[in-house]
Amino acid sequence: MTNRSRATMLIVAAVLLAGLAVGYTVHAATRSGSDRSGAGRTNGRLSLSGHGRILFRDTGMGTGKDHLASVTAADPGGRRIDGRLSCVRFYAAAGTGVCLRNDGGVVPTYTAVILDGDLTEVRRIELAGTPSRARVSPSGHMAAWTVFVSGDSYGSLAFSTRASILDVRTGTLVPSLETFSVAKDGKPYRAADVNFWGVTFADDDRFYATLATAGRTYLVEGSVRGRSVRTLRENLECPSLSPDGTRLVFKKRVRPASSGAPWRLYALDLKTMRETPLAEQRSVDDQATWFGPDTVVYALAGDFGTDLWSVPADGTGTPKKIISRALSPAMIP
C-alpha cells in the first residue's frame, strides 16, 4: 500500500469518526431536550414569582445545559422553560435566589450571585472553592453556601469545606463557620480539622448544619448572632429542615465509603429525636429539598446527567422520578 493510499484511508476514517461523534451529540441533545414524548424546552423569562413552579439547574446535554430552567409543579415532566442563567448550584425562597456560578477560565473560579425576584443580580461574592450546597432562609433575608476547598467528594472525610452565611439585606458576610465557637457534647471544643457544610435555616438567626471532626460527623444547631454552634447528634450529614421546623431529612452513613454507596436518607423528629429511614434505599449524596410538608426531593445520577426523585418524608411509599436531567431544585409555591 502506498503512502498516499494510507493517507487517504486515514482521512476517510477520521471523517467517519467525526460523523459518528456529531450524530451521537445530536441524538443526545435531542433526548435531553425532551423529558418525555411530546415534551421539550422553550426559551423564556424566569422569575421567583411564578407561583406553582419548580426552578432547577438543567443537566441535560445541548444548548440548555447548566442553565436555570423551570417547569410547573403540576406537570414536572412537561415542557421546561430555559432561562439562560447558568448555575452550578441554585436555591431560592421568599423572592431571593442564590446562584453559585462557574466564571470559567483555564483554572475555573466561582462566584455566589444573589438574585432578586426577577433573577436580577443584586450582589456577588467570590468563592474560595468548588460549589457544593446552597440554601436561603424562609424569609429570604439570609443565604448560605458550601464549597470544597480541597477534594471533591463527601464519600470520605479526606476533604476540606468552607460554609458561609450572608445577610442579604446588609451584606454582612460570615466567610466561614469555622470562626464560630463549638460546644461538643456540652463542652467547649477546638480542633484544626473542624469542617462545616450543608446549612439549613430555621429563621434569620438559627440554623442547622453538619460538623465534621476526628473522622466523625455531627448535626449542629447554630446561631448567627451568637457566632456559636452546639452538637445535637452524631452521624448526620446535609440536613434539610421541614417547612414547619419540626423535622430534618438528612443522609446517614450506613456503609463504609469503600462500598461506593455509603448513605441512606433518614428523617429526624426534632422533639423526640427519633430517626426514620425513608423508602429510598439507594445511596443519595445530596441535600434533600422539601416540597411541601410531607415530600422530599433529591438528586440521583441518571443516564443523561442527574434526575430528581421524590419520596414521602414519613418512611412510607416508594421513590418516584419527577424531573429528568435536573439538579438543585427550588419550589416556588
Image (tube, rainbow, N blue to C red):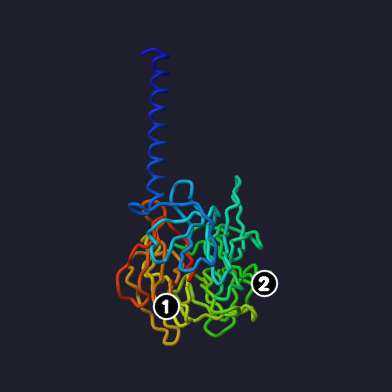
Q: Residue furthest top?
A: 2
The answer to whether 236 is drawn above or below residue 306 in the figure is below
**Residue count near mark 1 (Cα–Cα under 10 Å), binned few <14, some 14–19, many ≥20:** few
Would residue 216 be seen by someone viewing this image from the given angle? Answer: no
- Nearer to me, 34 or 112: 34
Q: Secondary structure at mark 1?
A: loop
**Kind of residue at badge 1:** Pro
Task: Indicate which disc residue 293 carries.
Answer: 1
Residue 120 image position (x, y, % from top left):
62, 60
What residue is drawn where x is 69% and y is 69%? 171
Would residue 189 be seen by someone viewing this image from the given angle? Answer: yes
Q: CA distance from mark 2 to mark 1?
A: 28 Å
- Nearer to me, 260 or 267: 267
Q: Are marks 2 and 1 in contact (CB under 8 Å)?
A: no
**Residue count near mark 2 (Cα–Cα under 10 Å), binned few <14, some 14–19, many ≥20:** few
- Nearer to me, 232 or 265: 265
**Kind of residue at badge 2:** Arg
Residue 198 image position (x, y, % from top left):
52, 69
Q: Which of the two discs, 2 and 1, labels the residue nearer the N terminus?
A: 2
The answer to whether 141 is drawn above or below residue 285 in the figure is below
Task: Indicate which disc residue 169 carries.
Answer: 2
Q: Secondary structure at mark 2?
A: loop
